[in-house]
Amino acid sequence: MSTTMTTGALRLNTLGLIRAQGEDAAKFLHGQLTQDFALLGEGEARLAGYCSAKGRLLATMIGWKAGTDEILLALPLELLPTLLKRLSMFVLRAKCKLSDASADWQLWGLIEAPAPGARWSLGREGESVRIRLPDDGSRSRWLLAQPADAPAPALPTITEADWQWLELASGLPWVRAETSEQFVPQMLNLELLGGVNFQKGCYPGQEVVARSQYRGTLKRRTYLYELDEGQALPGQEIFHSEDPGQPAGLVANVARREGKSLLLAETKIAALASGSLHLGAADGPLLRPRELPYALSEPQ
């Protein structure tokens, strides 16, 4: 399905912000998340996951420095209260205060013409930041974070459907309420998108994540699919035509536009060798594989 969207901006009301503030903020997040926050630079953002002790993702997020001792984490608003409460349990004596900063900032999604630049690079203008997001090669995508009283970007308004469609086409999955604790990071291709650092120290679930990477135990990846009929939901199971008795994967994210759907779905790698994949049941709506904009290299 060809893209018809133009450049523009959308207020991302489905995202919220957690603020980590204090001289130990970076050190604390470094010990909790899959990414290296101890060495987080001023000109970069970092994709990261927060895992349970079993290595299952509770949430995915994008983090960046908002000040010398302040880091902001953007994540789905539906997960923010639970995540904030859980992270706060582990602060203990660290000089770090966690709070909900959603009301203090506006988050915007920007679609612009193709432009050079590395994903997760960050530019600053006053207090506002622009973060380069993964894209599908047809447009560049940015996350704009600006103070709550700042004027809206001087760009046309795009629809939420267009933004979500391009986000899924970029291959960037988000953990949602329906899929929390369902995936280890590699199942969502998180390490391929720069969301896992395998050289950093321990964090919850680190042993499971490392074992999946280095012992060849990963049997699932996230793939991109198109759906011409039916309506998919995050957390919905998908089935293989040759194995109707058990699910072959799980829908992570869905975008719907012009009567069609785009899905990012975690799938058994072996299920793509033959047969076909279907939504909800082995005789359900057909999922048509679509190429991701990055290579699915397998752990060694």
Image (spheres, rainbow, N blue to C red):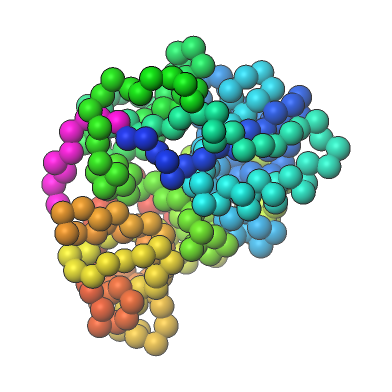
Q: What is the magenta segment's predominant secondary structure?
A: loop
Between 298 and 18, the one lying in front of the other is 18
Q: Position of residue 80 (x, y in %)?
A: 58, 47
Between 181 and 190, the one lying in front of the other is 181
Q: Residue at x 52, y 40 (%)?
A: 16
**225 relative position to 78: left or right:** left
Q: Position of residue 130 (x, y in %)?
A: 42, 24
| Residue 300 in view in this figure | no
**237 relative position to 57: left or right:** left
| Residue 194 in view in this figure | yes
Q: Is residue 91 above or below residue 147?
A: below
Q: Residue at x 57, y 62 (%)?
A: 181
Give yes or no for residue 101 being in the magenta stretch.
Answer: no
Q: Which residues are magenta?
A: 1-9
**297 relative position to 7: left or right:** right
Q: Is residue 207 above or below residue 133?
A: below
Q: Position of residue 294 (x, y in %)?
A: 34, 45
**Which image quarter: residue 32?**
top right
Give yes or no for residue 6 being in the magenta stretch.
Answer: yes
Report the label total.
Answer: 0
Between 166 and 186, the one lying in front of the other is 166
Q: Residue at x 70, y 51 (%)?
A: 86
Q: Position of residue 58 (x, y in %)?
A: 59, 55
Q: Is residue 186 above or below residue 21?
A: below
Find the residue positioned furthest to the right. 93
**124 relative position to 184: left or right:** left
